[in-house]
């Protein structure tokens, strides 16, 4: 800027100088021009460069004064003579004369503009970036309310009205000054600070009592500390020994009490002791193997005291390593035993609700479990007569055992025979079928037929027995095919009879060989057993006060054809095996198939009767990964379809929306309902709050700068609600 | 949300302020006695009641989540918590309580006769015990409308009658001149469906035949799904068919291939149809799948009756083997098994969980069959003929029994839900309200495609499609866009981006990640430990409190 000014000044000066010299010449020239113009011929003359003219030729530059440079001093020379020039200008010019620097030529227009733009942008950016915080806050706010600074409608709380009011008149000010000086409440006159302070203060007596208490406690503490310090300093080992022993005794006494009063703490103590015992057993501390003990051992032969000391050490060890037997422990052991004895109860009941009272279970469950253990023994035993058995039991158990053993033997014999007969039938057909599933089915049928035979025996026996009191409907169900049926039936039969009979625990050791065999069987038809357990779960007999007089006709439909009727009547016979087969089929269908890509003759000899080598088969049979476990894997009596529900997948979301990272986040947000059916009105309003709220008819002004300042002061957004 | 909280607080504050002036006045009157609010803040809500309205577990905000996600999670957490608390707070607005019958000492409640009950209760309740002697047209099927105001009777020999049973006003009575297998109200009391000898017919409440649906033949049993407007029918030809009664279209026809279907019930929780079969199985069906969703072996004989409770938790079945079984239908596990000397031919569960079972001509009602083992019925009543249909009346302590000699309305204290939802099923609604409700119900109709075992399935992300899509995307892009990006340290100037520095920064981040994992595992472990400890303590407490069976010999 300064340079520019200077330049202008220079120009002014030069023009002034010329003006004075050339005025006459110019006048003359003008005159000449006017004369020539009178001649009619209007020819433009090109002016000379030396003159200031409107039109000037570039080409008629006269060479006058060429070569000699104009110095600044030449120009300034006249400066002193002219009084019009101010001293300031003169000074500046002189300075300029002294400095030999040339002035840089000004930047081009584009560049200056660019620089100016840059500067302006930076200015604006800093200005705008002040709003960043507010903008971010508003973007993230759950709800925006416009116009920004609106007074909340409705009645204002008294408090706010009072605080907003200010003392204005001098009288008011004086009064307020007085109030504040005396610590009187200004706004809400409930209690003055002094009043609250006085309320908080204690009475004198109370304070005295408290002080005395504190003093006493402090004194006691100091006594105790001093005592402890003194005791710790005592070096006598004997003292400590005796002391420790004493402590232990006291502790034991306390422990016994603790067992009665606070078993949890006692248990903790017990654990501690157990830990100490463990540590003792691990360490060599009292084992008389240390340096001291060895030295004592040398002396022991002669020294009574040394011998005694060693003995004591060993005693300590013994004492510490001795297993603690307390009443608490005993209880636990008892419980453990109980648990071992009772499992048939426990396993029986699936929920713990009725396990609290084993007597409530009555006979049925016991009977059932017993049957489970000694599978078929019961049947034969029943044939022999259960009532007799139980009657004898109390008199002498030996005899019972004997009879039972006999029954067992008889039972084995019959079974062996049956099996032999069966095998003769089954073997040829069984050899043909290689498929595993078929085999199992085969086994199952084999077993069922086996049991059927036995059941028939039992049936015959049951028929023979005089205690048989069956209703007609029961007889309809007597065609039993499976073991389960036999059991169920026997249960049903005996349910009313056995109700009075005492439960008899089956001796487990008695029939060991039988048990092992049982185990083997279990492995083979595990599924069937599970299912049976499910189906013949302990049932509770309900006593009904009114007996139905009308025999209900199950189906009086005439349309039912004969075959269906028969089928329905005997439906219960093979239900379980049917179901199992069905389930097996479903499972097999879900299994992936092995793809066999072996081509005969590739890489080896081909032709009739040649087997594909094992190596090749292994290489070209592709096994796909097994499917995830079925949902009904652990439910023997349930088949759950594994088919995907495609109709609902049309309505499901199948891609995660933007901010979510995993399904659980999305699902948890989706799963809380929004509608009025599930929520209270206020919740609905809160959940479906609009993002932006505007007041009808109100002008929404852009945010003012004061808003920004206010926000800065308050540190919170005013409009972000 | 902050604003809202503030709002709440200010509201509360407002209330306090409003209360305060009174107090101060009192104080000034009484003297120096100071009175602070003894119960500051909003009234506390009992924890168990809050727990009752719990809808979801708390979601944890991940450490390095996008701020939008974090905001979203926090807000939804707050909203759901508020919803839960509010619901718990307003729960006390349902003050009606269900009662039950209590006998004198040494008196079984099952020996109390209906006449005695009817005499002892008030006149209106006593009037709800009545008998209709209709011996001419054979055993009757029964159905109550959803509000419990209207009763529909269908006699085997063609007699169909609908009654406003509380005012004993006969709405219509017709004889269809054909055998009637089942009757069912549709969504309102204006229409009902009758399964006749050959076809399915629909009548209006004046007895005018509206439709004869030839597509539905030999129907034996019907169920109406009120929120889907679906009429599900089971036929003798082993077809399970669904009719959308709002548009009159057959939604699905499923051949069950299991023979005659005469045992049917619905699960009100998820609109799944349960069918009982002569081979002892119970199958679960939805209109979207041609095969059974679940097949359970329940009895050794045929299944005679099935019923599911209102919450969809328990299923009760009775079979030819004379057993009565209770299942947890969510886990498909048996809970209880009872032996009924004569077997139950009909079962029905009330809204409050009372079970009625009919054996021959005796109707027995049991209380709480699933929790405590029951040894005798809560109530018993002998009707004149063989029981043919049982139905508890909604919102009333009444059990309707249709039998060979007509209809008996029994009083069963504690059967009905005392608090009804006026917007859903209002027993006292006017005609206008009914119309409004109908429009609303139609608007809110649930599409049959949404029926599935788990009703919350709709809110889950379709995992299979999602994975498929994701794989495709990964293949197209060449990288996994959802995978966490590997940390690339920023270049820093002034020599701070030396190789060592970069490595250090990388390590820092890696450590941070690892620490988070460790933190999580430790937390899990602590939690498990705590749980185990609690369990042990409980067990110990139980063991100490439990008296051994042999304790009685100790003294």
Image: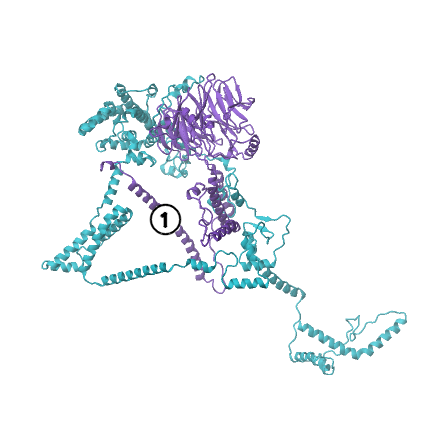
Q: Nearer the viewer, residue B441 or A645?
A: B441
As drawn, the residue found furthest toward the left would be A302
Figure check: A131 above or below A379:
below
- Where residue B233 appears, as percent x and y from the top left, is 49, 26
Q: Nearer the viewer, residue B255 or A400?
A: A400
In this picture the colour scheme is by chain
* Left or right position of B529 against A400: right
- Where residue B534 appears, as percent x and y from the top left, is 34, 45
Colour displayed for chain B in the image of the structure: purple
Report crowding for label 1: few under 14, some 14 to 19, many 20 or more residues within 10 A (C-alpha): few
- Where residue A165 appears, as percent x and y from the top left, is 57, 58
Mark 1 chain: B
* Residue A195 location, quadrant: bottom left
Q: Is residue B303 visible?
A: no
Q: Nearer the viewer, residue A652 or A338?
A: A338
The residue carrying mark 1 is B525
Q: Which chain is cyan?
A: A
- Where residue B355 appears, as percent x and y from the top left, is 41, 29
Figure check: B289 above or below A155:
above
């Amino acid at each position: 800027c300064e340079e520019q000014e200077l330049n202008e000044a220079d120009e002014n000066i030069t023009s002034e100088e010329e003006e004075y010299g050339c005025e006459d010449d110019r006048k003359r020239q003008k005159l000449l021009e006017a004369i020539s113009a009178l001649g009619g011929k209007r020819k433009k003359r090109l002016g000379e460069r030396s003159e200031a003219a409107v039109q000037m030729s570039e080409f008629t530059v006269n060479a006058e004064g060429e070569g000699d440079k104009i110095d600044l001093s030449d120009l300034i020379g006249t400066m002193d003579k002219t009084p019009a020039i101010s001293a300031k200008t003169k000074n500046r010019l002189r300075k300029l004369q002294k400095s030999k620097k040339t002035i840089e030529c000004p930047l081009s227009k584009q560049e200056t503009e660019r620089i100016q733009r840059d500067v302006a942008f930076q200015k604006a950016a800093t200005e705008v970036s002040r709003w960043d915080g507010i903008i971010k806050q508003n973007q993230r706010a759950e709800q925006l309310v416009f116009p920004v600074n609106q007074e909340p409608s409705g009645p204002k709380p008294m408090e706010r009205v009072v605080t907003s009011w200010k003392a204005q008149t001098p009288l008011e000010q004086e009064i307020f000054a007085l109030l504040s000086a005396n610590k009187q409440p200004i706004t809400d006159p409930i209690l003055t600070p002094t009043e609250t302070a006085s309320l908080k203060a204690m009475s004198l007596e109370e304070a005295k009592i408290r002080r005395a208490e504190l003093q006493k406690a402090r004194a006691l503490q100091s006594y105790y500390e001093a005592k402890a310090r003194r005791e710790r300093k005592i070096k006598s080992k004997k003292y400590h020994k005796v002391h420790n022993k004493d402590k232990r005794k006291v502790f034991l006494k306390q422990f016994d009490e603790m067992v009665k009063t606070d078993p949890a703490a006692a248990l903790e103590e017990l654990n501690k002791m157990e830990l100490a015992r463990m540590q003792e057993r691990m360490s060599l501390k009292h084992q008389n193997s240390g340096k001291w003990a060895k030295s004592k051992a040398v002396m022991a032969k002669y020294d009574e005291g040394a011998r005694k000391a060693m003995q004591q050490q060993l005693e300590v060890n013994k004492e510490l390593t001795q297993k603690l037997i307390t009443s608490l422990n005993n209880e636990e052991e008892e419980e453990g035993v109980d648990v071992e004895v009772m499992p048939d109860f426990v396993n029986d009941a699936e929920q713990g609700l009725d396990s609290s009272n084993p007597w409530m279970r009555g006979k049925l469950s016991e009977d059932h479990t017993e049957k489970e253990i000694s599978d078929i023994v019961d049947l034969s035993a029943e044939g022999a007569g259960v009532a007799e058995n139980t009657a004898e039991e109390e008199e002498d158990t030996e005899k019972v055992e004997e009879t039972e053993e006999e029954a067992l033997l008889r039972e084995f014999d019959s079974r062996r025979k049956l099996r032999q007969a069966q095998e003769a039938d089954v073997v040829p057909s069984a050899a043909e079928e290689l498929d595993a599933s078929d085999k199992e089915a085969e086994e199952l049928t084999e077993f069922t037929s086996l049991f059927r035979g036995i059941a028939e025996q039992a049936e015959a026996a049951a028929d023979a027995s005089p205690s048989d009191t069956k209703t007609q409907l029961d007889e309809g169900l007597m065609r039993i095919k499976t073991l389960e049926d036999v059991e169920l039936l026997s249960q049903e039969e005996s349910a009313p009879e056995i109700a009075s009979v005492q439960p008899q625990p089956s001796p487990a050791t008695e029939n060991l060989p039988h048990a092992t065999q049982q185990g083997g069987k279990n492995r083979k038809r595990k599924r069937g057993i599970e299912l049976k357990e499910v189906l013949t779960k302990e049932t509770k007999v309900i006593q009904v006060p009114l007996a139905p007089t009308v025999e209900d006709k199950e189906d009086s439909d005439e349309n039912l054809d004969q075959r269906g009727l028969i089928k329905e009547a005997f439906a219960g016979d093979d239900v379980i095996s049917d179901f199992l087969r069905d389930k097996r089929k479903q499972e097999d269908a879900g299994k992936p198939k092995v793809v066999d890509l072996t081509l005969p003759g590739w890489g080896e000899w081909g032709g009739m009767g040649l087997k594909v080598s094992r190596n090749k088969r292994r290489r070209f049979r592709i096994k796909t990964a097994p499917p995830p476990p079925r949902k009904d894997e652990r439910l023997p009596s349930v088949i759950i379809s594994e088919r995907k529900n495609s109709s609902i997948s049309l309505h499901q979301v199948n891609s995660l929306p933007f901010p979510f990272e995993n399904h659980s986040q999305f699902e948890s947000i989706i799963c809380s309902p929004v509608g009025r059916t599930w929520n209270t009105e206020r919740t609905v309003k809160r959940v479906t709050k609009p993002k932006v709220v505007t007041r009808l008819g109100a002008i929404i002004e852009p945010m003012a700068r004061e808003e920004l300042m206010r926000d800065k002061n308050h540190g919170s957004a005013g409009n972000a609600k | 949300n902050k604003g809202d909280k503030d709002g709440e607080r200010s509201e509360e504050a407002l209330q306090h302020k409003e209360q305060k002036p009174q107090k101060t006045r009192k104080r000034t009157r009484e003297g120096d006695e100071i009175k602070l609010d003894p119960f500051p803040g909003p009234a506390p809500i009992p924890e168990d009641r809050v727990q009752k309205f719990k809808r979801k577990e708390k979601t944890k905000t991940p450490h390095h989540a996008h701020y939008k996600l974090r905001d979203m999670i926090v807000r939804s957490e707050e909203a759901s918590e508020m919803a839960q608390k509010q619901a718990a707070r307003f729960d006390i607005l349902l003050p009606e309580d269900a009662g039950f019958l209590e006998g004198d000492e040494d008196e079984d409640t099952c020996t109390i006769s209906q006449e005695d009950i009817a005499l002892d209760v008030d006149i209106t309740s006593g009037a709800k015990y009545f008998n209709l002697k209709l011996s001419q047209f054979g055993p009757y099927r029964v159905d109550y409308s959803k509000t419990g105001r209207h009763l529909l009777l269908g006699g085997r020999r063609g007699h169909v009658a609908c009654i406003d049973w509380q005012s004993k006003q006969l709405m219509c009575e017709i004889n269809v001149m054909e055998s009637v297998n089942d009757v069912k109200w549709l969504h309102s009391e204006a229409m009902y469906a009758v399964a006749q000898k050959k076809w399915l017919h629909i009548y209006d409440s004046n007895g005018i035949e509206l439709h004869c649906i030839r597509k539905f033949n030999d129907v034996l049993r019907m169920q109406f799904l009120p929120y889907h407007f679906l009429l599900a029918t089971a036929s003798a030809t082993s077809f399970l068919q669904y009719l959308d009664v709002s548009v009159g279209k057959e939604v699905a026809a499923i051949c069950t291939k299991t023979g005659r279907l005469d045992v049917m019930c619905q699960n009100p929780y998820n609109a799944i149809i349960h069918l009982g079969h002569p081979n002892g199985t119970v199958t679960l069906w939805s209109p979207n799948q041609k095969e059974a969703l679940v097949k359970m072996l329940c009895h050794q004989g045929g299944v005679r009756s099935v019923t599911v409770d209102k919450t969809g938790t328990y299923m009760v079945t009775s079979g030819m083997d004379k057993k009565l079984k209770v299942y947890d239908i969510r886990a498909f596990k048996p809970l209880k098994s009872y032996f009924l000397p004569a077997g139950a031919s009909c079962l029905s569960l009330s809204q409050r969980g009372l079970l009625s079972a009919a054996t021959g001509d005796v109707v027995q009602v049991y209380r709480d069959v699933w929790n405590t083992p029951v040894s005798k019925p809560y109530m018993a009543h002998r009707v004149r003929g063989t029981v043919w249909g049982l139905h508890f009346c909604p919102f009333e302590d009444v059990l309707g029994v249709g039998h060979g000699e007509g209809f008996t309305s029994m009083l069963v204290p504690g059967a009905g839900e005392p608090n009804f939802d006026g917007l859903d099923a209002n027993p006292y609604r006017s005609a206008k309200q009914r119309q409004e409700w109908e429009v609303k119900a139609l608007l809110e109709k649930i599409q049959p495609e949404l029926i599935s075992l788990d009703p919350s399935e709709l809110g889950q992300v379709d995992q299979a499609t999602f994975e498929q899509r994701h794989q495709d995307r990964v293949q197209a892009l060449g990288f996994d866009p959802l995978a966490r990006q590997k940390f690339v340290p920023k270049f820093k100037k002034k020599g701070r981006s030396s190789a060592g520095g970069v490595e250090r920064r990388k390590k820092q981040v890696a450590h941070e990640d690892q620490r988070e994992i460790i933190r999580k595992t430790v937390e899990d472990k602590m939690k498990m430990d705590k749980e185990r400890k609690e369990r042990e303590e409980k067990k110990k407490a139980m063991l100490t409190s439990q008296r051994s069976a042999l304790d009685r010999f100790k003294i």
